[in-house]
Each structure stands twice: as structure tokens, then as C-alpha cells.
Image (cartoon, rainbow, N blue to C red):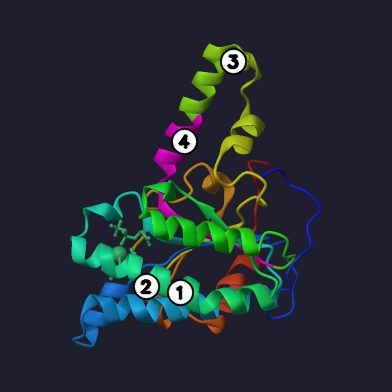
Amino acid sequence: MSPGSASPAAIPGGGVACVRHVAIIMDGNGRWAKRRHLPRVAGHRQGMEAVRRTIRAAGEIGLEALTLYAFSSENWRRPVDEINDLMGLLRLYLKREIDELDRNGVRLRLIGDYHKFAPDLVEQLEAAVARTANNQGLTAVLALNYGGQDEIVRVARRMAEAAKAGTLDPAAIDIDLIDDHLDTAGLPPLDLMIRTSGEVRLSNFLLWQAAYAELLFTDTLWPDFDRAALEDALAAFGARERRFGGR
Ligand code: IPE
Ligand code: IPE
Ligand code: MG
């Protein structure tokens, strides 16, 4: 995630700020459904529509990367029926959306330990990544079985193994080297982290990468999120003063 030449996305409302990479904790599907006396899966289904809308809007706005928290390493604690519903919707999303994503130049990427998913789903995910690998538009990153702590544990383990094998000098470990070993290696630095549904916590999302990200919490439930909500968030981001420890 080393800073490179920025291609700034226009901030709605006039200004241009350097926003390259936005991440979203897509929360509130269950409450959206509950308010309508619908089963939770109905909320997840509408959440999938919000994913479709938001990826399209992010591409049109000109973001470089959009990272979406779709399934956390802690979401295995949910009832198995709900987990199965989420996996089913992911299969459906890939099947239904891959043509349009590809047509729109979206490059799909994955972060998290998604290899723990069912083999057919892993295959489907990797096929979608391979098919879109050379696209030049938005990089849409799906966080699947992702946890920030788990990601750092996996990096530490790999580095310890390399040190033991004699291929890594512990003195060479610095911030850039860790960046290069994270699941997010090569993505632009995270500028803005949005969480929907009114909860004010990170829930283990992009802990390392959020070091200097701007945080934005909105009461909008994820299934109601749309282009206007993304534009509002970008406008709020544009009004922030980022100091990175300077003055
Ligand atoms: C987010 O909505 C979707 C996932 C975590 C997969 P929730 O299912 O967490 O919705 P709430 O928080 O219960 O409303
Ligand atoms: C975070 O939402 C995970 C995703 C959006 C995938 P949760 O609903 O799982 O988070 P908590 O449990 O409220 O912290
Ligand atoms: Mg939730």
C-alpha cells in the first residue's frame, strides 16, 4: 500500500480531494429485514443489491479501490442456516454479476482466508478473479473470512518461517515489508472507512490499514446504501483535514 501517483476522484459538491481507496463495513442487513418483519435473508438479499449499486457508483466516480466487508472471521459464530444463506447469495452474486463487472472494467480481488469456504465457491471466486485480472477500472475487493487480527497473524507466521529458513533477516522487517505481506498488498493506502447501521466499531476490519484512514459512521442500513450515500460520504471526507501526525 505504498503511496503512488494519485488519480484523484472528484468529490461531489465541487472540490477534488485525493480519495483513492474506500472500505465499507456493510452492516445492518438483519435490522433492515426486522423492521419489515421479514426473515434476515431478505435483508442480505437487499444487501447484495446495495453491493451491486455501490460498486457501479464507485467505478463511475473514479475510485481506484473499494473494499467491502462481506464475511468476517467472526461471522462463523452465526447460525449455520444464516451462514448457508450468505454463501448461497455470494454464489448467486458472482453468477449474476460477473458479466457486468467484467464489461465495466472492474477488477475483482479477494482478501481474507477465503480458502476455508466450500471448494466449489473457492473455485467460482478464483475464476472471477482470474477473468477480471487484466481489467483497468475499479478494483473491487471482497473481504471474505477476513479478520484484521487473523491477517496480521498470517503475516507474522510467514515471516517467522522465512526467518527460520534463513531467507528473511528480522532486521529487514519494517512497515513497508509488512504492507507488502498483507492481503491488501499493492492496493492504494486506505483513505476512508465507512460503517453503516449506526454501530461505531471496526469489528476487526483492516486494523493495520486503518492507521490513518478517516472513519465515517452513518445510520443508513446497508440495504439502503446507494450512490447518493456514497457521494455524501465522499463529500464529508473532502471536508476533513488529514494531518498524518504533522501539523
Ligand atoms: C451485515 O448485516 C451482513 C453481514 C455481517 C454478513 P448483519 O447481518 O450484521 O445485520 P445486523 O447487524 O444484524 O442488522
Ligand atoms: C461486521 O459486521 C462484519 C461484516 C459487515 C461482514 P457484524 O455485524 O458481524 O459486526 P458486529 O458483530 O456487530 O461487531
Ligand atoms: Mg451486524
The amino acid marked with disc number 3 is Pro
Q: Amino acid at mark 2?
A: Leu
Gap between marks 3 and 4 measured at Cα: 16 Å
Please report the residue visible at 37 percent of the width from the left and 48 percent of the height from the top.
116
SS for callout 4: helix
Residue 141, magenta (yes or no): yes
Which dot marks residue 93? 1
Classed neighbour count for the residue bearing mark 3: other residues with Cα under 10 Å, few (<14), some (14–19), many (≥20):
few
Please name the residue that numbered disc 4 is placed on: 152
Viewer-nearest of discs 1 and 4: 1
Taking the magenta stretch, the answer to whether it contains residue 29 is no
| Residue for badge 3 | 170
To which residue does mark 2 refer?
89
Amino acid identity at mark 4: Ile
- Choose between 208 and 104: the one closer to the eye: 104
Stretch in magenta: 138-155
Ligand 2 within 8 A of label 4's CB?
A: no
Measure how far apart labels 1 and 2 are at the Cα level.
6 Å
